[in-house]
Amino acid sequence: MPVTTIIGTQWGDEGKGKCVDAAAADADAVVRFQGGNNAGHTLVVDGEKTVLHLIPSGALYDGVDCYLARGTVLNPETFLEEVEALRDRGVDMAGRLFVSQNTPLIMPWHIEMDAARESGEGAIGTTKKGIGPTYEQFVARQAILAGDLRRPDDAIAKIEMFYGERLASLRANWNGEGDPPFATVDQAVERFRRRHEQVYTRLVPFISDVETELRERIRAGDHIVMEGAQGTYLDVGMGTYPFVTSSHTTAAGACTGAGVAPRAIDRVIGVCKAYTTRVGDGPFPTELPVDSGVGRHLQDVGNEYGATTGRPRRCGWLDLPMLTEAVDINGCDEVVITKLDVLSGLDEIKLAVDHADGEPVYETFEGWQNDITDVRDTEELPENARRYLEFIAQRLAPFDCTIGQVSVGPGRRQIFEY
Ligand code: GDP
Ligand code: IMO
Ligand code: MG
């Protein structure tokens, strides 16, 4: 299928990076269309682990072009560090990594604002990467865009015009002791000039008209993977508001975020863990305590610690009504079930099949004890694992959706067709 969108169906960290890396083997290009370096996408190839925050998960294939479209927000320092870290490991992104001229830039005051808010009563457990405040300034039509770095005087004019308003807001959100440490307008301009000379100029060669090029490539029949970040229930519109990120993480976001038409998308794949995790605050109906028992098992065996902030992830059972709603919202043709191997060794496995009075209603399945990380065929799975998957597949069927693949380990090859 020429254009495939891959998104998370839960609260992020479903294994999207791994699935995109697997799909990129047959792709010409991979596109990030929303979010920023709040994402942490893990690829494991020949036992070597790579965590990407900003660069698309097609990076490890020499022949795959990588795009950051205008729906993303970009921290120039993080971006350049990631490019350099890849280069140090022999992965050269030169000539195959492109940043949209319309991508809003994360500036120091956005990160300061994120931290200031997170230290107050309205905290929601963000990654403190400045994501929300950057999208806010963009929606206010005041953002500094990547393309402005080609004409630094334009960016400086914007800082002179708009930073005063941000500064007032920063001061209003300051919860620390003593004088707020924020830059004045003059200092912010000076800081920008310095960073422009030292850092931002190095971003300029990557900047191009990404959206026009993508539409041309789609028309030419190129195989393109749209790589979602975060997950459906972190979508600013459809998620568990206000405990969400500030972008459209659902499949529709690929269109607005990359400037392509809905009809250009041929297939949508939803990535779903065989259980559920969440980082940050907010509701989580099937959550389990992680100090002992199954919650501890999921966190330990699943190594459920954030790829971006290192925070322990909250863990719980898979929630089917939430999954089918996500499938419906995103129009998923297929779901990839990841981390099935993490359930090995449990005596019984619960699956939320309904919600009553806000509480999950569970169906209980017998577990399996065998290690399944070397399984590459559904028929080789323990019978109890197949029963669990079959139950999920039956619930997806009314939505014209199937289980497409099953992942049984972090490695690139630990995935097979269901
Ligand atoms: P993403 O944000 O959706 O790309 O997911 P993350 O990379 O943040 O988190 C998923 C974690 O699970 C990473 O450490 C992956 O290497 C790992 N992973 C992915 N698929 C599997 C799987 O099938 N089994 C196991 N055990 N680990 C997996
Ligand atoms: P990937 O792409 C899991 C969560 C944060 C917080 C909320 C808002 O790796 O799946 P933000 O910094 O975006 O303003 O934080 O969203 N969050 C994620 N949780 N995986 C992610 O990305 C996340 N990106 C943001 O923990 O609850
Ligand atoms: Mg992640």
Image (cartoon, rainbow, N blue to C red):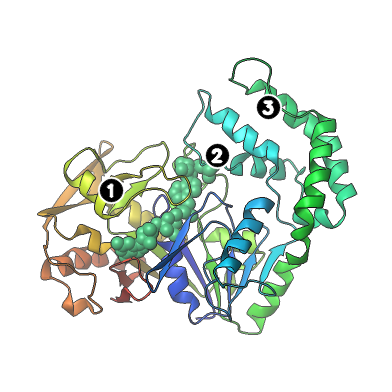
Give the CA distance from mark 3 to mark 1: 36 Å
Q: Is mark 2 within 8 Å of ligand 2?
A: yes
Local SS, label 1: helix
Residue furthest front as drawn: 88
Give the CA distance from mark 3 to mark 2: 14 Å
Give percent across and percent down for residue 3.
Answer: 54, 75
- Quarter occupied by residue 355: top left
Q: Relative to 282, does residue 388 appear above or below in the rendering?
A: below
Quadrant showing the C terminus = bottom left
Q: Amino acid at mark 3?
A: Leu
Q: Is residue 225 left or right of residue 280?
A: right
Give percent across and percent down for residue 290.
Answer: 25, 40
Residue 299: which disc? Answer: 1
Residue 42 or residue 104, whichever sits in front = 42
Classify 10 Å Cα crowding around label 3: few (below 14), some (14-19), many (20 and above).
Answer: many
Q: Amino acid at mark 1?
A: Gln
Q: Residue at x 57, y 49 (%)?
A: 247
- Quarter occupied by residue 146: bottom right
Give percent across and percent down for residue 21.
Answer: 46, 71
Classify 10 Å Cα crowding around label 1: few (below 14), some (14-19), many (20 and above).
Answer: many
Q: Residue at x 79, y 35 (%)?
A: 188
Residue 354 or residue 306, whichever sits in front = 306
Residue furthest top as drawn: 178
Give percent across and percent down for residue 53.
Answer: 54, 56
Q: Residue at x 66, y 38 (%)?
A: 110
Instruction: Tell whether label 2 touches label 3 (CB within 8 Å).
Output: no
Residue 128: which disc? Answer: 2
